[in-house]
Image (cartoon, rainbow, N blue to C red):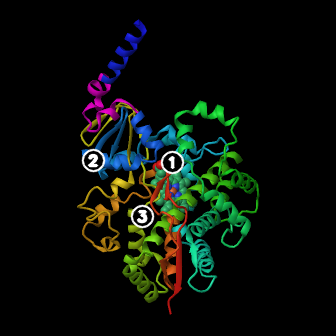
């Protein structure tokens, strides 16, 4: 009886501390979420974290307490402080340890600033815009974009094609060309490589990843008995073999890592290459899939026409100077970014004040692109509507570009941004220069967003479109 009494008293004190004494007690948000993390965990396991946080922002404003020690923010000033201050913002939380491969850290899973910066410097030159726009790289992407169009149009008549699969093929073929040519995947032309992409792009990692994050020891223990279906086992073995080769093309990321004066061991190199391979697959393929689906809806006929007109009128203009193409891609990334969810960081020693709120050291703080892309209706009027033209307006351009967070920002933002933009633009150029697309009448799969652990993809994992040649 005495024990029960003590436990109840202890629990009451915890609730009182979290609701009244904690420096976060003044942050708006539901009291129940401020009292226990179980509320957030519930929304995470039920695939609702992003939508729940967005609804809280709409109700409480740009700063919301979502757990006893976690706060979500939704302004550019907050994003700048969290992700850009001191170059690369605050350190990451242990959630990112789940992205180790071969039980070895990569740049993405390195939590602290200094070792991360050292890692990033090793490969940064392979991803800067001037390197990515070199003829070697551009031609590589163009060939693959042409293979995509050929694949989608090989059968004549109004046959529908599942672009979900072929866009993932395109994304991984482009990424692995940049990473380890001449041993990159050719899934648009080889049946064996296509089978690997099918396996990689139909997985569902959400619950397993949260289990691993919250119940690490239990997960490790049960994994010994249950044969865990790791989607990347096959590709992991292949990448390890490629890393050990000495015939890698000079333009690649792997060559850069292999020839660094202070070379990493082969497991670390493999972990890095593996992470970039999956980072390039799960993002560009889904971003293009959502965007092409939207462009193929009857309501988007004018967007396709304007895009086709620009491409047909300017066949030899450098791809980056096509303003309507750029506007389509930006609006696609705003509306259907494949990384919509929070990118968690830890508040540094002695705490910080953001948006007038003091956050103690080790508070978890983040912004989510989904809300940054919608909440401020002065910057994005009619936020739920797909309006590429908004990006052509000079007025408000700085604010729009600041809030566009598809690639995040600062020194830990997406290193593959310029490669991804080139891939996306090249594919749209090769497609809409010569073809019109429409959603096939047989398309019944849901294109609603299915949140995975970090990325998001269409629920139905299928997108049937018809391609018609423009004569
Ligand atoms: C539309 C396509 C893409 C989107 C929307 C995207 C988005 C992002 C975002 C938001 C981050 C930061 C994540 C965080 O802080 O937690 C990130 C990091 C990263 N991305 Fe991308 N990405 C895309 C394509 C690519 C491609 C094609 C590659 C490489 C081939 C790539 C490689 C990486 C890497 C290595 C990081 C970690 C960077 C670091 O830790 O310094 N991404 N990406």
Is the CB atom of the residue marked by disc 2 within 8 angstroms of ligand 1's nearest atom? no
Write down the quadrant of residue 42 in the picture: top left
Q: Are marks 3 and 2 in contact (CB under 8 Å)?
A: no
What is the spatial separation of the Cα atoms under label 1 and label 2, in whole angstroms? 23 Å
Vertical side of 26 occupied by 327: above or below? below
Element carrying mark 2: loop
The answer to which of 244 and 160 lies nearer the viewer is 160
Crowdedness near tag 3: few (<14), some (14–19) or many (≥20) residues, C-alpha within 10 Å: many
Q: Which residue is mark 3?
A: 333
Mark 3 secondary-structure assignment:
helix
First-in-chain label (1 vs 3): 3
- Nearer to us of marks 1 and 2 is 1
Quarter holding residue 347: top left
Position of residue 259 measured from the top left corner of the image (x, y, whole percent):
68, 56
Residue 377 in the figure: left or right of residue 145: left
Instruction: Please indicate, yes or no, whether residue 416 appears anywhere in the rendered image.
Output: no
Packing grade of label 2 (10 A; few <14, some 14-19, many >=20) is many
| Residue 197 vertical position relative to residue 236 in the rendered view, above or below | below
Give the residue displayed 28% in from the left and 73% down from the top: 393
Residue found at the very far bottom of the displayed protein: 471
Q: Which residue is mark 1?
A: 453
Give the residue at x 25% y 60%.
Answer: 377
Q: CA distance from mark 3 to mark 2?
A: 21 Å
Callout 1: helix, strand or loop? loop
The residue located at (48%, 86%) in the rendering is 315
Residue 34 within the magenta-colored segment of the rendering: yes
In the rendered structure, which segment of residues is drawn in magenta? 16-37
Give the mark nearer the N terminus: 3 vs 2: 2
The reply to whether dot 1 and dot 2 touch (C-beta < 8 Å) is no
The one of 178 and 98 positioned closer to us in this rendering:
98
In the rendered image, residue 1, in percent from the top left (x then y), is placed at: 41, 7
Is the residue at mark 3 in contact range of ligand 1, meaning its CB lies under 8 Å from it? yes
């Amino acid at each position: 009886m005495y024990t029960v009494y003590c436990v109840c008293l202890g629990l009451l004190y915890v609730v009182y501390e979290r609701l009244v004494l904690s420096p976060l007690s003044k942050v708006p948000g539901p009291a129940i979420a401020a009292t226990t993390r179980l509320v957030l965990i519930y929304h995470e396991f039920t695939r609702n974290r992003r939508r729940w946080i967005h609804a809280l922002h709409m109700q409480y404003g740009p700063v919301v307490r979502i757990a006893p020690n976690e706060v979500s923010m939704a302004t550019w000033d907050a994003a700048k402080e969290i992700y850009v201050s001191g170059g690369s913002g605050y350190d990451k939380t242990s959630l990112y340890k789940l992205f180790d491969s071969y039980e070895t850290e990569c740049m993405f899973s390195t939590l602290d600033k200094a070792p991360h910066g050292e890692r990033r410097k090793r490969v940064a030159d392979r991803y800067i815009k001037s390197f990515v726009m070199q003829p070697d790289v551009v031609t590589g992407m163009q060939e693959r974009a042409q293979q995509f169009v050929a694949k989608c149009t090989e059968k004549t008549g109004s046959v529908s094609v599942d672009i979900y699969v072929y866009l993932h093929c395109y994304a991984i073929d482009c990424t692995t060309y940049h990473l380890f040519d001449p041993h990159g995947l050719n899934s648009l032309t080889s049946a064996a490589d296509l089978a690997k992409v099918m396996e990689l792009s139909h997985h569902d990692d959400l619950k397993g990843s949260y289990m691993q994050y919250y119940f690490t020891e239990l997960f490790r223990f049960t994994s010994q008995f249950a044969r865990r279906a790791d989607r990347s086992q096959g590709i992991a073995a292949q990448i390890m073999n490629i890393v050990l080769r000495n015939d890698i093309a000079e333009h690649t990321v792997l060559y850069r890592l292999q020839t660094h004066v202070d070379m990493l061991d082969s497991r670390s190199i493999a972990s890095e290459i593996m992470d970039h391979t999956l980072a390039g697959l799960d993002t560009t393929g889904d971003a293009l899939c959502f965007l092409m689906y939207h462009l193929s809806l009857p309501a988007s006929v004018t967007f396709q026409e304007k895009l086709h007109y620009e491409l047909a009128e300017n066949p030899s203009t450098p791809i980056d100077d096509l303003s309507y193409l750029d506007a389509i891609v930006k609006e696609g990334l705003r509306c259907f970014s494949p990384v919509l969810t929070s990118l968690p960081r830890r508040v540094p020693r002695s705490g910080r004040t953001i948006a007038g709120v003091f956050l103690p050291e080790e508070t978890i703080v983040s912004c989510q692109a989904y809300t940054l892309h919608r909440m401020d209706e002065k910057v994005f009027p009619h936020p739920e509507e797909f309006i590429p033209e908004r990006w052509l307006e000079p007025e408000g351009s700085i604010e729009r570009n600041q809030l566009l967070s598809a690639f995040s920002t600062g020194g830990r933002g997406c290193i593959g941004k310029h490669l991804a933009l080139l891939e996306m633009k090249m594919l749209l150029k090769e497609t809409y220069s010569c073809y019109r697309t429409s959603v096939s009448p047989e398309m019944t799969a849901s294109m609603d967003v299915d949140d995975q652990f970090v990325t998001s993809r269409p629920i139905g994992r299928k997108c049937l479109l018809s391609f018609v040649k423009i004569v």
